[in-house]
Amino acid sequence: MTHTPWSSPHATTPSSGPLPPVDWIDHVDTDPVRALEMLVLGWYPAEEAEPDPKALADDELARLPPALAAFHRLARLRPALHRFSNPVLLHPQHVKRPHGSQLVFAADNQGVRDWSIPWPPRGGPMDSDPPVWLTEDPHVDDDPETILDAEPLSRLLLQFTLNEACGVAPFNAWTRVMPLERLEPLWNFLRPVPLSPFLPTYTGDLFYAATGLLASVSADETEATIAFGTRHREILAPLRAYDFPWSRFDA
């Protein structure tokens, strides 16, 4: 039997050594913060970097919800987290919105939307993992549209990181596929990440992973748009076996 590089957590590429496994998926439902930590530490390499003097201090982190504090602590170990195209803010911003006082913790790089949590904490059971609000056009609309996300903060941060890691990976493969039945072979090696669709009013992406590979899939009743991302060019090569109409293929 022929094995692809995705078939084993100990798979290697000719130049890079062991690839990040996907056992972090096992913790998404029970401990999403741990899943985030495992994903980030496996996906992003360590860097020699001086501590950012603008980063939140330990006492400031202690006042944040655990998932957001964990993200910022991870960024100390993996500075790539602060180089997302849509950034998690180095310093969350306290704002007033029509639906209440909020703490904006992430923003679209064009300023057309941001993500926030109720702030200050309201003394309820959701304080440790608060709900997340997506706000549209927060800087140009006096009464911006706000949408309550399906996921709480811990799982939203995992979605956010998956979306960025896949989208800005060093090597990509993109395709649009129809009919949907053509996707069936992919489920033989891709593990689904048990999260709700990301940005459901836009693309509604669902995430999948294999060893060394992330995938984002947006589908309707007839077709799907798929984006694969990897940090190792060689990992994309087996995808050539699927006769999809590739619009980009970095291998």
Image (cartoon, rainbow, N blue to C red):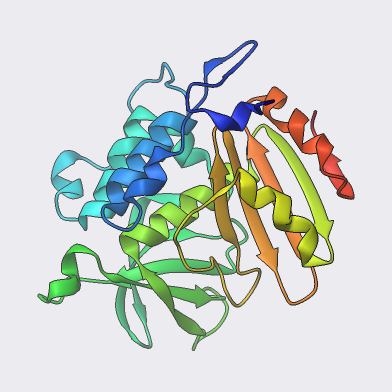
User: At x 59% / y 46%, what residue is drawn?
Assistant: 190
Q: Position of residue 195 (x, y in %)?
A: 45, 62
- When asked about the image quadrant of residue 51, the answer is top left
Regarding residue 43, the answer to whether it shows in the image is yes
188 vs 239: above or below: below
Residue 56 placed where, x, y %?
Answer: 26, 43
Residue at 76% from the left image edge and 37% from the top image edge: 239
Q: Which residue is at a point 43% across and 30% down the rendered structure image? A: 42
What is the total number of numbered labels drawn onto the structure image?
Answer: 0
Q: Would you place residue 61 above or below residue 218 in this image?
A: above
Residue 111 picture location, percent across and down = 58, 64
Image side of residue 24 versus residue 213, left or right: left
Q: Is residue 21 left or right of residue 235?
A: left
Q: Is residue 54 visible?
A: no
Q: Nearer the viewer, residue 124 or 59?
A: 124
Furthest-left residue in this view: 123
Left/right placement of residue 149 relative to residue 85 reads left
Residue situated in front as seen by the camera: 74 or 205: 205
> Considering the image in quadrants, where does the C terminus appear?
top right
Residue farthest toward the front in the current orientation of the protein: 1
Q: Relative to the observer, which residue lies in front, 111 or 241?
A: 241
Which residue is pictured at 39% across the width and 31% down the height? 41
Q: Quadrant of the N terminus?
A: top right
Task: In the rendered view, tell whether residue 172 sits above or below residue 140.
Answer: above
Q: Position of residue 182 (x, y in %)?
A: 80, 58
